[in-house]
């Protein structure tokens, strides 16, 4: 194989099993982030064997002993003109590892040796390094430095959860749409929490035609949602309804903000709930609030006065539920979402944050219970877009506890988490640290960079320093989903994107044309009014 390889340098100085320096000719030095190949001897199954070690260039350095910064400019020019200027170039490479015959990645135990030649890693080797078998592969794009080398992620990597992190406009939602589409094609059951209707068109191709799996994709929308797009635009929209009558006392206390330590209030609320259920099978928060406000009409003589006062105090908490406007007389069963090879997009657009949060809590709690109990026996992938709103670092939300529970325990039962955010510094560290795989796109905020570094053991300082320099659609991928860290350019989507940035220039041109039309209409109206005034004055003159 070495006869077909392009040699670009020689290992120099100190080398270890994790990194090495190499010298090259000035005109032959590869660019930063290029992939290299060198050979090393490792013990494999108790026998010495030559292995192909893949490395990646982290730094490129050039220097000259003749051209020093202490020299005057004129002297430097003369040295260059006389041909006495020396040029040296060398690079530092990070060892990524070598592949065994079974395709597993191994880290070398021995140092690569100085004097060994260094080659450009061939495309076929890199493709083995960064790809997986068809039934396991999530195809996301290609290497940034080697566009001919496809990159795929391992479905198995979802067992340790995933975080997609990038600042606004870097392409994280676009990428998430690709991953969702790939998972669905492989038989995944997916629940997508979608605060801004970014994913409601996943049943449509780029040209607007129906996706071949459109019948396996449903958009759920609460009746109180105004919705960003109409049902006709989206297609296959179903209501997500929550019946207030189905809630038990503990859940009503949770969403009303009543602590279990408020014994009298909890007991008073429970008494009111008992009386209401005796009167009605189906009821709304307004009905329970009315019961609490009219406690004198149903209290008994032997009822402790503290409980009575507790019921009255509970009324102010129930006002919050009334204002949520999220409950209906019907209920959507979680079994409508948990179906084999099915994508459920939960469209939360147009809802208040509290309402979105509570709907997320209900859906994820029901899904977790269904999967953990063994009633649903297929892998479930939960995508949480705008995750910093649901699991904030500083305070608790309705859904934060169940999301953290999925992060900590979900993999035991087959429910896997994907958090998507532009503000990792605002996500609870417990949830983010459980995501052993991370796809990180452009990030410039220092606090967010620090949060990413703290949550990822595999993201080295060099890769972290390069996050601000990534272009839109480029990503660093680390963790269980890939054999080694990848710098990838994300491929084109096959599905329609919702919530993308508007065409500012196009819309402004439309505004100019609209203004011209209005000017013409205004001028026509003015002329008509002038003509009408002239005619009226003429008639008055004739009289």
Image (cartoon, helix red, strand yellow):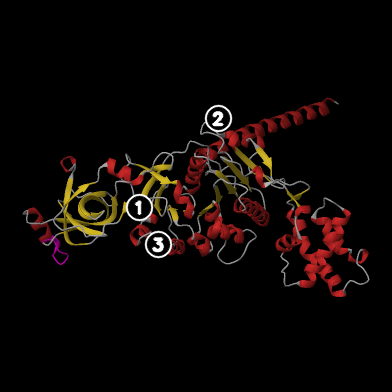
Residue 167: tell me if it is visible.
no
Task: Residue under label 1, please give it.
Answer: 484
The alpha-carbon separation of the residues under discs 1 and 3 comes to 13 Å
Quadrant in which residue 543 is drawn: top right
Seen in the image, is 524 located left or right of residue 185?
right
343 in the magenta segment: no
- Front label number (2 vs 3): 3
Task: Residue under label 3, please give it.
Answer: 457
Q: Characterize the local packing of mark 2: few (<14), some (14-19) or many (20 or more) Cα atoms within 10 angstroms.
A: few
- Residue closest to the eye, 136 or 144: 136
From this view, report whether residue 28 is shown above or below residue 59. Answer: above
Residue 425: tell me if it is visible.
yes
- Residue closest to the eye, 101 or 231: 101
Q: Earlier in the sequence, mark 2 or mark 1?
A: 2
Q: Characterize the local packing of mark 3: few (<14), some (14-19) or many (20 or more) Cα atoms within 10 angstroms.
A: few
- The residues colored magenta run 66-74
Seen in the image, is 98 located left or right of residue 503?
left
Task: Residue under label 2, please give it.
Answer: 209
């Amino acid at each position: 194989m070495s006869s077909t390889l392009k040699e670009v340098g020689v290992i120099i100085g100190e080398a270890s099993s994790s990194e090495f320096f190499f010298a090259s000719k000035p005109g032959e030095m590869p660019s930063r982030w290029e992939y290299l190949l060198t050979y090393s001897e490792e013990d494999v199954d108790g026998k010495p064997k030559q292995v192909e070690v893949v490395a990646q260039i982290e730094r490129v350095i050039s220097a000259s002993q003749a051209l020093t910064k202490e020299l005057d400019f004129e002297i430097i020019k003369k040295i260059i003109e006389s041909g006495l200027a020396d040029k040296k170039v060398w690079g530092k490479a990070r060892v990524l590892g070598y592949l065994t015959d079974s395709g597993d990645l191994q880290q070398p135990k021995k140092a690569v040796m100085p004097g060994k030649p260094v080659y450009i890693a061939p495309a076929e080797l890199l493709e083995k390094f960064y790809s997986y078998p068809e039934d396991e592969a999530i195809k996301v794009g290609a290497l940034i430095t080697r566009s001919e080398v496809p990159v795929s992620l391992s479905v198995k990597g979802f067992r340790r959860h995933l975080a997609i992190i990038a600042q606004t406009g870097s392409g994280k939602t676009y990428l998430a749409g690709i991953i969702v589409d790939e998972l669905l094609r492989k038989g995944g059951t997916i629940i997508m929490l979608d605060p801004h209707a970014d994913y409601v068109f996943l049943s449509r191709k780029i040209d607007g035609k129906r996706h071949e799996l459109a019948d396996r994709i449903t958009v759920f929308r609460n009746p109180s949602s105004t919705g960003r797009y109409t049902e006709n635009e989206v297609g296959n929209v179903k209501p997500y309804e929550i019946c207030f009558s189905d809630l038990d006392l503990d859940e009503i206390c949770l969403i009303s903000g009543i602590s279990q330590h408020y014994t009298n209030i909890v007991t008073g609320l429970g008494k009111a709930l008992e009386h209401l259920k005796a009167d009605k099978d189906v009821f709304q928060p307004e009905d329970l609030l009315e019961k609490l406000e009219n406690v004198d009409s149903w209290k008994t003589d032997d009822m402790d006065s503290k409980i009575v006062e507790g019921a009255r105090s509970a009324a102010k908490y129930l006002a919050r539920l009334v204002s949520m406007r999220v409950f209906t007389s019907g209920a959507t069963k979680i079994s409508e979402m948990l179906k084999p090879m099915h994508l459920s997009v939960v469209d939360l657009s147009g809802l208040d944050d509290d309402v979105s949060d509570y709907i997320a809590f209900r859906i994820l709690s029901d899904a977790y219970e269904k999967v953990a109990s063994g009633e649903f026996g297929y892998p479930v992938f939960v995508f949480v877009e705008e995750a910093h709103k649901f699991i904030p670092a500083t305070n608790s939300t309705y859904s934060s506890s169940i999301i953290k529970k999925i992060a900590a325990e979900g993999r035991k039962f087959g429910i896997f988490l994907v958090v998507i955010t532009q503000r990792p510094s605002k996500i609870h560290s417990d949830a983010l640290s459980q995501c052993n795989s991370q796809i990180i796109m452009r990030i410039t905020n220092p606090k967010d960079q620090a949060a990413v570094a703290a949550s990822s053991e595999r993201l080295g300082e060099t890769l972290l320093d390069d996050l601000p320099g990534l272009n839109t659609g480029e990503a660093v991928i680390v963790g269980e989903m890939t054999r080694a860290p990848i710098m990838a350019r994300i491929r084109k989507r096959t599905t329609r994107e919702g919530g993308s940035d508007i065409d500012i220039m196009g819309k402004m041109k439309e505004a100019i044309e609209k203004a011209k039309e209005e000017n013409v209409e205004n001028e026509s109206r003015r002329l008509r009014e002038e003509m009408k005034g002239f005619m009226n004055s003429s008639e008055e003159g004739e009289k």
